[in-house]
Amino acid sequence: MAVTRTFSIIKPDATRRNLTGAVTKMLEEAGLRVVASKRIQMSREQAEGFYAVHKERPFFGELVDFMISGPVVVQVLEGENAMQANRDIMGATNPKDADAGTIRGELAESIEANTVHGSDSDENAAIEIAYFFDDAEIVG
Ligand code: ADP
Ligand code: MG
């Protein structure tokens, strides 16, 4: 297996509950290293662009409203097969289906306010990292 990078967002439900550290600890304990991190307030345009792949889904408007409802922490994570390692520690999209010990299983509030985003492929990870970070901001 190769060391790769993936993209993560700690969502507004988590920053509101002061869980940035708790989420990051779970990521680190899963073998991932935070090689870039910044706390930002996303604009509506930025959130709509980020989630453009979901724009036909019925929850798109609410998802964008939620993602701009408070600050988020965008991160680049590095590790062995980082995309899959992150998806594994995140847990299922709906916290009702998420295993105990996963971030969503332990911390998420609802299917929408589900604490974290994680890229779903290496290709999307590269696109999503470039959407929020310049190369010089990533220090491995
Ligand atoms: P994941 O975040 O697990 O990759 P998706 O890419 O399918 O899940 O969905 C993106 C985000 O949209 C989810 O993390 C969640 O915040 C929101 N979402 C997904 N499904 C629903 C739904 N049925 N109702 C409301 N929000 C949803
Ligand atoms: Mg997704």
Image (cartoon, helix red, strand yellow):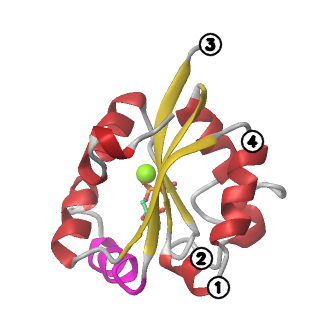
> Which label belongs to residue 1?
3
Looking at the image, is mark 3 or mark 1 earlier in the sequence? 3
Q: Amino acid at mark 3?
A: Met
Q: Residues within 10 Å of mark 2 (few under 14, many from 20)?
A: many
Helix or strand or loop: what does disc 4 sit on?
A: loop
User: Which quadrant contains ligand 1?
Assistant: bottom left
User: In the rendering, at what x and y percent does residue 130 appear?
Assistant: 27, 43
Q: Amino acid at mark 4?
A: Ala
Residue 66 drawn in magenta? yes
Q: Nearer the viewer, residue 58 or 98?
A: 98
User: In the rendering, at what x and y percent does residue 10 appear?
Assistant: 53, 65
> Which label belongs to residue 103?
none
**Residue position marked by numbered label 1 in the rendering:** 17
User: In the rendering, at what x and y percent does residue 91 appear?
Assistant: 67, 52
Q: Residue furthest left?
A: 45
Write down the region rendered in magenta: 59-70
Decide if residue 85 is in sight here: yes
Looking at the image, is mark 2 or mark 4 earlier in the sequence? 2
Helix or strand or loop: what does disc 2 sit on?
A: helix
Q: Amino acid at mark 1?
A: Arg
